[in-house]
Image: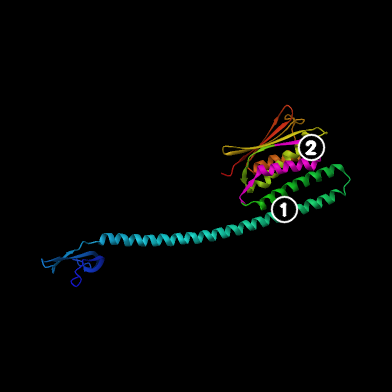
Amino acid sequence: MRERGEPVHFADAPFAMARLDGGGIETAYFDYALSPLRDEDSSIAAVLNITPETTGRVVIEQRLAKAQAALAESEAKVRRRTVDLEAALNAKTLLLHEVDHRVKNNLTMIGALLRLQSRQIDDPVITAKLDAMMERIDALATVHRRLYQSDDVTKFDIAGFAESMASGVIGASGRGDIKLVVDIEPIEVQSDYAASLGLILNEMLTNVIKHGLNDGRSGTIKLSARGNGADYVLTVEDDGHGIDLDKKSDGLGRTLISRLSKQAGAKVTWDRLEPGTRVTLTMKSVH
């Protein structure tokens, strides 16, 4: 400074200082601001030294820097862990899709074998029972097909499945005099219950064809699906003969519906209409 005559500033200069209480050496930090004081002839007569201590601020900044470095390391670990979990999830999803695909293929093969066997049987009663069993197998195969085609293996759009199944059941019946009216919104349930709910819907829809609109009776099937707070409600309604609620049914279809609804935590109710029947399936949402 004496050579150039310019002020000099040292920011946060460290100094090792002995503690007065004998506690050893510790580092303190100071700002040094040196400014020349000149005589009348502009020569430097003295130096003004302003030296405030900055130890407190420097220590806080050092602690903050360490905390930020630790946070950055933690975030890096979280990102690495997230990448690993996403990779594991993708692998699990692929595996589940493969399982659903294979299950669907196996069910399709079983259905084909039953159809071959059915053609060798002349007894119409046995043939009818085999046909009903094949319809249930086809329903399960369709459930697994939709599961392996889904992006989210934890959810199952039961409303979309119901619309597809209703169209399929009517088409398989060969009945051109049955009209399907659909009014649905997406309903996602836990995929764990997909098979049970799929079988329930199969029974609901096939019952309409076999009992409500049998004997050549033309009519309309109305399919609706809506959210209702914490529950989802799916209804199948027809204008057919109508169910006799006073008559106790011991058929396999009603038995399946009763048992499967308990497994899926769902509720099925029947209402007699004039004319026809309404079957309501109430399910818990996935949210």
Residue type at mark 2 is Lys
Give the amino acid type for the residue marked by disc 1 in the picture. Answer: Lys
Q: Position of residue 106 (x, y in %)?
A: 74, 55
Q: Is residue 143 above or below residue 182?
A: below
Q: Does the image show residue 250?
A: no
The extreme bottom residue here reads 3
Q: Residue at x 66, y 55 (%)?
A: 97
> Image quarter for residue 182?
top right
Identify which residue, 180 or 40, lies in the foreground. 40
Q: Is any part of residue 101 visible from this angle?
A: yes
| Quarter of the image where one finds residue 269 | top right
Q: Residue furthest left?
A: 40
Secondary structure, mark 2, is helix
Colouring rule applied to residues: rainbow
Q: Could you tell me how many numbered marks the image carries?
A: 2
Closest to the observer: 123 or 271?
Answer: 271
Name which quarter of the figure residue 256 lies in.
top right
Would residue 160 be counted in the magenta stretch? yes
Q: In the picture provided, is 64 more to the left or to the right than 173?
A: left
Q: Which residue is mark 2?
A: 210
- Which contiguous range is marked in magenta? 152-181
Mark 2–mark 1 distance (CA, rounded to whole Å): 26 Å
Work out which residue is located at the far right of the displayed protein and give it. Answer: 122
Residue nearest the observer in this picture, 153 or 151: 151
The answer to whether residue 39 is left or right of residue 213 is left
Image check: 151 left or right of 240?
A: left
Pinpoint residue 21: horizontal percent, then vertical percent.
19, 65
Secondary structure under badge 1? helix
Q: Which residue is mark 1?
A: 104
